[in-house]
Amino acid sequence: MSYSIGQVAERTGLSAYTLRYYEKEGLLPFVQKNASGLRVYSDSDISWLSMIECLKATGMPIKEIRQYIEWYKEGDATLSKRLELFRKRRLTVMQELSKLQKILGKVEFKIRLYEKAVAAGSLQAVDGSEEINQLREELFGDPNYFPEVEEKKAV
Amino acid sequence: MSYSIGQVAERTGLSAYTLRYYEKEGLLPFVQKNASGLRVYSDSDISWLSMIECLKATGMPIKEIRQYIEWYKEGDATLSKRLELFRKRRLTVMQELSKLQKILGKVEFKIRLYEKAVAAGSLQAVDGSEEINQLREELFGDPNYFPEVEEKKAV
DNA sequence: CCTTGATATAGAGTAAACTCTAACGTATAT
DNA sequence: ATATACGTTAGAGTTTACTCTATATCAAGG
């Protein structure tokens, strides 16, 4: 099947502006144009977009995604570079997952705190309480925790 | 304890530029200045920074963090607004976690694919294979999956 | 043929979150 | 007391990823 830019925009949730921008940035080197210069997207282009969105979701900037696509175009000589790239992405995603788990714990602590505060009609009445302090201790240990700095200390 | 801007930068991993920027944006309304105009940070300011970094990690923009801080300054009248804010943050983080889990699956699929390709010395030799196609099917169903669009369909 | 709507290009504009510069004041160790 | 490091402000600059504008061409129905 083949698709117009509008159809691809509809299907992917990206705007036509964004699709042209991606192409200009070298992320979609395989999109064809017809005799009148209109873009014609194939199913393969849709797959590429799906992969691009995946890499973007791992926190990868557009420049690096272009690098991956250039490696792809260079063929089997770059297989191990691409493997290494995906391994790095896996590490990034796993770190982000564990960071977000901790963040979720902190947010849930705040929800419990504010549920109590709303019930009591006052934040001060509950913030220093035994129960809340113990919970805070369990969740954080150090109440002022800066993960970025901890990582540097660990290295 | 009290700290200079440089000490806070060291401790939090944020630059002094960023700390001043946060203050200008209304995120740190409690930082004091001494007689000569130098900033003096307290432990409470460090706690606020820890909370700000937490909210930022949930994907919250600075404008909305300022809103939260303004609600805090308004006192107990805004308790339920703040509770609602944290509940929304919890939802956002949970959605991001589940998105990242899916992304991780896709990245791990690519790693397996490229491990085989590196071993075979060729991507084509493995990409269409039974084993890989089955794995792809199990992992994705639809090979071109656009979560943002799916969400819209679901609503 | 004409209108309407989609698409083309080049290039300007936007938003967020920093990041830095310039010119000047403060703190402290020799 | 003076060099050096650290801090102040206002405001300009940067980066990323879009997002839009202006102007022109293309496609399809009446």
Image (cartoon, coloured by chain):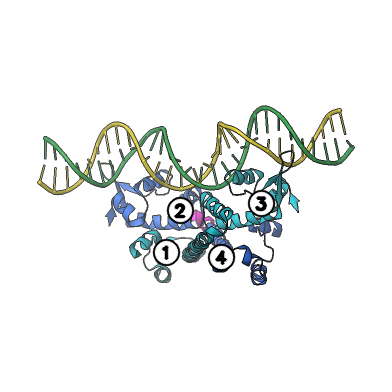
Chain colours: A blue, B cyan, C green, D yellow
Q: Amino acid at mark 3?
A: Gly
Q: Which residue is mark 4?
A: A121
Neighbourhood count class around disc 1 (C-alpha, 10 Å): few under 14, some 14–19, many 20 upward: some
Q: Are marks 3 and 1 in contact (CB under 8 Å)?
A: no
Camera-side residue of A11 and C8: A11
Question: What amino acid does circle 1 point to?
Answer: Asp
Quick check: is A78 in the magenta stretch? yes
Q: Residues within 10 Å of mark 4 (few under 14, many from 20)?
A: some
What residue is shown with label 1? B127
| Chain for numbered disc 2 | A
Please report, as a chain letter, where disc 4 is located. A
Protein chain holding label 1? B
Q: Which mark is residue B13?
A: 3
* Residue sitting at x 70%, y 49%: B41
Measured Cα–Cα span from mark 3 to mark 1: 43 Å
Checking the image for residue A72, the label placed there is 2
Disc 4 and disc 2: Cα gap in Å?
Answer: 60 Å
Q: Secondary structure at mark 2?
A: helix
Residue at point 63% right, 55% down? B48
Question: Looking at the picture, do discs 3 and 2 lie on one chain?
Answer: no
Residue D29: percent from left, percent from top: 13, 49
The Cα atoms of the two marked residues, 1 and 4, are separated by 61 Å
Q: Which residues are magenta?
A: A74-82
Q: Earlier in the sequence, mark 4 or mark 2?
A: 2
Query: Residue A75, percent across and down?
Result: 46, 53
Q: Which mark lies nearer to you, 4 or 3?
A: 4
Asked if the residues shown at circle 4 and circle 2 are in contact, with their CB atoms under 8 angstroms apart, the answer is: no
